[in-house]
Each structure stands twice: as structure tokens, then as C-alpha cells.
Image: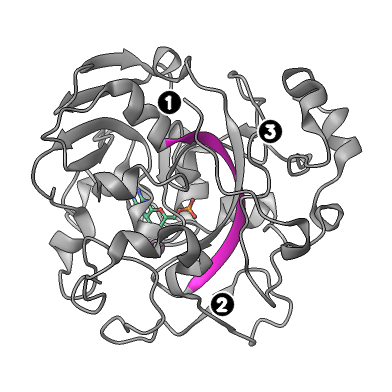
Amino acid sequence: MTTRVPRIAPSEITPPQVYFNRRAFLTGALAAATGVALGRATAAVVPAAAGAPLPYTFDAAESVGALVHAPDQNEKPNTWYQITHFNNYYEFGTSKTDPAERAGRLQTRPWSITIAGEAEHTGTFALEDFLKPYALEERIYRFRCVEAWSMVIPWVGIPLRAVLDRLKLTSRAKYVAFESLYRPSEMPGQNVPILEWPYREGLRIDEAMNPLAFMVVGLYGRVLPNQNGAPLRLIVPWKYGFKGIKAIVRITLTETQPPTTWSLARPDYYGFYANVNPNVPTPGWSQESELRIGNPFFHQRQKTLMFNGYAREVAHLYKGMNLREYF
Ligand SMILES: Nc1nc2c(c(=O)[nH]1)N[C@H]1C(S)=C(S)[C@@H](COP(=O)(O)O)O[C@H]1N2
Ligand SMILES: [Mo]
């Protein structure tokens, strides 16, 4: 199974040397896994404060450069500190700093994942076994929260499409539903009925099969910190951040559109599709612009791009749909 993000011309992106440091990477713990295939593109520099090395294979050569056509924006990745200390993870509280303070108590090993529904290969698997068939890739994606802030994040993971291909979906599989861990003893926010627990998300199958949809196990070449959704979370870079469900324990292939946490909570605010769309405001605030976390000119918001700048890759999925209705 080879799924590749569309390659882009070097002239279209910020020169890699601006944010990559090949030498630092090559002398790092991951060099052995990547070998000579690395070529000119390298992974993001592993910050000194980062966590443990990934216990899985890591193929940085596969897709560095997934940061696609974002004209006139500063696309320097956010720092490890910014990405891991400004989080939304209501299982640990509703403030941006709660996850960094509290998620450390979550036991992410052992971890198992259940596959159910319209697929040939269903069952419960240890996470290590579930991940074994895949080479990890790095994807540097823009991340846009519906609260109108954004970051650029170097994730490590596997294309969701590769997973779905191996599961062999039946012809009745039209949607894929994801469920987070429910463990109130370690997730204090689950004792508060602020959302319906466990957290749930979903995608239409063709969205899930898009090469950009990504299952994440790492950050900056290291193990994903708990506050960012360890040990396994989803990233759908053209959708608002809440689609990126954390701490996944269950994947169900369904015939009908699955209920999702935020659309259950506030259907008038947060739809199932949740595509980044500067033309459709959320009741109460505009989605036309965003605040890039860490922007030294913090008062200068930047324009939000349709589909978060990934229109070329995903706009075809929504042909004929009224994007105001299916927000
Ligand atoms: N299980 C779970 N997943 C979740 C959330 C959550 O509260 N619980 N918050 C979502 C929201 S609103 C955002 S913006 C992103 C934040 O991801 P980050 O903390 O890695 O930036 O996670 C999403 N995934
Ligand atoms: Mo969000």
C-alpha cells in the first residue's frame, strides 16, 4: 500500500533549511531508521525538551513536504513547548493549560484498539500489533481550531487510508467512527457532564481515504505527549481541530453517519463536516481570520484559508454540497 501526499515543487514552500536542520536530525536517535533515503528533505529538529524516542519504525523520507501551498504565510512550525502547553482536551479540564498539568497521570500502556463494524478484519488488538505493518511518516500540517487560533505541527504517524485498506471494508462501510478512552479515574474531566463521554468523532469514507487524513503517534519525531492525545489520535488538517480525536480506543465502520461529540453538544455551532471555511461564521464569532500561536506580532491575525489551505487536495470531496448547510 503506498499512499503519498502530492509532492510539491520546492519553489512553493518555505526553504526547508529555514525550519529543518538536517545535521541535527541525522545525528539524532532516528537516523538509523531512515538511512540514505532521507535525501534533501529531513524531519523537524527534535527539541531538547522532547519526550521519549518512538518505539516504532520511522520513515521521514516518505512525506516531509506535506505542508502545501500556503502563500504569504509564516509557516514555521510551532515550538514543542507551544504545541504541548496550549491544548484542548476536556477529559482533563477546559482550560488550555489543564492537559499539560494533568494528562501525565493517564496510563497509555498497555493500550488496545478495537475495530468493529463493516470490515473483514475486526477485533481487539494491542496497539503495538496494530501499528506494526506501517512505516511511520512525518507530516507538517497547519492546525486550525474552531476557536480561531492555529499552529503548524510536525506530526508523526500513518495515513488513515493505509489502515482502512488493511481492514478490508465491506461495501456497506460509508463512514468511519472513532471513540476516545473512557476512564474517569485517570481523566478527571469525565466526572463533569460538560460533554457526552466518551468523546466521539467520525468521517465519511472518502474523506477518511484522502491521503492527508492521518493517524498520529508522534510529535517532532518523538512519542506523542499525553496532552496531545497519546498514544493514538486523528489529524484531519482541512477540518477544525475538534475532528482530531485523541486517545482512540475504537474504530467502527458504519453504514450511517455516526454521532459526534461536538455536533451533539452544539449542532448549531459544530457540524459533522467541520471543514475550515472562512465564509461560514460560527454563531458568535467569525472564521475569516486566525491567530497563529507564537506570532510575535500577536495582534496581527492572518486570513483563514478555505479548507485550511488544502483545497487543492480536498475540495473535490464536497462537490455539489452546500458548504453553508454542511458546515
Ligand atoms: N478526546 C478528545 N479529543 C479532542 C479534544 C477533546 O477535548 N477530547 N479536543 C479537540 C479540540 S477542540 C482540539 S482544537 C484538538 C486540540 O489538539 P492539541 O491539543 O493537540 O492541539 O483536539 C481535539 N481532540
Ligand atoms: Mo478546537
Q: Are marks 1 and 2 in contact (CB under 8 Å)?
A: no
User: What's under tag 3, amino acid-wise?
Assistant: Ala
Camera-side residue of 177 and 100: 177
Q: Nearer the viewer, mark 3 or mark 2?
A: 3
Q: Nearer the viewer, mark 1 or mark 2?
A: 2
**Helix, strand or loop at mark 3:** loop
| Residue 114 figure quarter | top left
Camera-side residue of 277 and 40: 40
The reply to whether the residue tagged 2 has its Cβ within 8 angstroms of ligand 2 is no
The reply to whether the residue tagged 1 has its Cβ within 8 angstroms of ligand 1 is no
Picture quarter with the C terminus: bottom left
Colouring chosen for the image of the structure? one colour
Disc 3 target residue: 60
Label 3 vs 1, first from the N-terminus: 3
Seen at 21% across and 46% down, the residue is 191
- Left or right, 268 with respect to 219, comes to left
User: What's under tag 1, amino acid-wise?
Assistant: Thr
Disc 1 target residue: 108
Disc 2 target residue: 291
Q: Tell me the distance, in whole angstroms, between the alpha carbons under discs 3 and 1.
A: 24 Å
Q: Are marks 3 and 2 in contact (CB under 8 Å)?
A: no
Which region is colored magenta? Answer: 149-159
Camera-side residue of 273 and 94: 273
Seen at 32% across and 82% down, the residue is 280
Seen at 62% across and 24% down, the residue is 54
Q: Residue 21: horizontal and vertical position, in percent? A: 86, 45
**Helix, strand or loop at mark 1:** loop
Number of residues whose C-alpha sits closer than 10 Å to that of mark 2, classed few (under 14), some (14–19) or many (20 or more): many
Seen at 18% across and 76% down, the residue is 325
